[in-house]
Image (tube, rainbow, N blue to C red):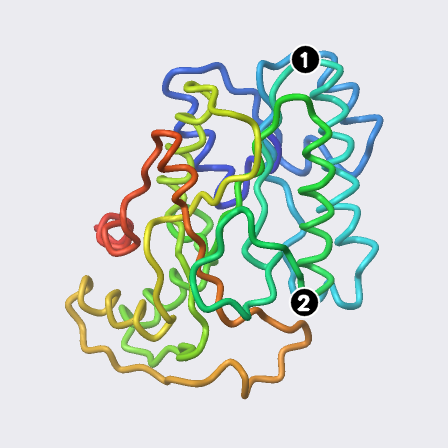
Amino acid sequence: MTGAAGQLGRAIVTRFGRAHDVLAATRAELDVTRHADVQRVAAAWRPDAIVNCAAYNAVDRAEDEAAAALAGNALAVRSLARAAMDAGCVLVHYSTDFVFDGTAREPYDEAAAPAPLSVYGQSKLLGEWFALDAPRHYVLRVASLFGGEPRHGSLDRIADALRQGRRPRVFTDRIVSPAFVEDVADATERILLAAVPSGVYHCVNSGHASWHEVAIEIARVLGVDPVLDPVAARDVPFTAPRPRYCALSNARLRAAGIALPSWQDAVQRGLRP
C-alpha cells in the first residue's frame, strides 16, 4: 500500500487491516517516484497486490510543476506496474474524473473518451495508461473524495464551515459524483476478492448533483440552515481549468456485482458524529 498517510490511504489500510496483512508505506517510507526503491521494496515484500494511493494532487500548482505532476502521477505508476509484473501480483491504481473535459450531458461511463483540460488531468491519464501495463490491473476512477482523515476534500470543507456557522462558497455549475472513502475502500476489497475482470472502473457513490445541491444536503444532515455563497465556477479564475460536468456512472462496477450506495446515503454516514 503506497500513500498510506493520505485520506484514501488511511481508509484502505483500516479496511484491509481487518482481514489481511497490510504492508503500508507512507511517502516518507517509500517515494514512488524513485524507480529503484519501488522495485527493491516490491521484490522484498512479494505482495499479492499493490494498491497505489500515492499521487500528486495539487491541481493548480501542476500547471507550473508539470515535471513533478508527471513524476508522481504517471512515471511512478509505470514503476509500480513493472513491479507488479515482476512480482506476479495485481495492481490497483486510483485515477480521477479530471481525465474528462466536462462537456458531457449525461454521466461518463468507462467507454467515454478522456480529454483532460489540465496538466494534472493529463498526468493522471498517463498514469492510467501505464497501469494497464500490469498483467492484472484495476484503474479505479474516484471523485470528490470525502470522509476519514486528514479531512481536506471539498465536501469536508463545506461541512466544517456549516458546523462553524460560516458561509461556504459552493459552485452551482459543477456537477459531481462524490465518493466516500470508506465505500471506496470497501469496493476495492470486494473487487480484489471477487477477482473481477481487469480494467477501468468508476468507483464513486451512485448519483450526481451540483456542489450547491450537495451543500444543501449536508446542511440537512447536520440540522443547520443552508446559508451558502453560491457562485459559478465559470466566473472563478482558476489557474488550471476544471471540468464542469464530472458525473460518473458506476454501472460497470455494479454489473460486476459491486454496487455502491447513493451519495446521499454516504453523506448521511460520513457526517455521523
Could you say whether the residue bearing mark 1 is in a helix, strand or loop?
loop
Left or right placement of residue 97 versus residue 163 in this view: right
Cα distance, mark 1 to mark 2? 35 Å
- The image quarter containing residue 172 is bottom left
Q: Residue at x 49, y 48 (%)?
A: 142
In the depicted view, which residue is nearer to us: 30 or 253? 253
Q: Residue at x 39, y 56 (%)?
A: 178
Q: Amino acid at mark 2?
A: Leu
Q: Is residue 237 above or below residue 249?
A: below
Determine contact: label 1, label 2, CB under 8 Å. Answer: no
Looking at the image, the residue that sits furthest to the left is 223
Q: Amino acid at mark 1?
A: Gly
Q: Is residue 250 above or below residue 78?
A: below
Q: Position of residue 182 (x, y in %)?
A: 36, 40
Q: What is the number of the mark on residue 117?
A: 2
Residue on which disc 1 sits? 88
Q: Position of residue 113 (x, y in %)?
A: 62, 55
- The answer to which of marks 1 and 2 sits earlier in the sequence is 1
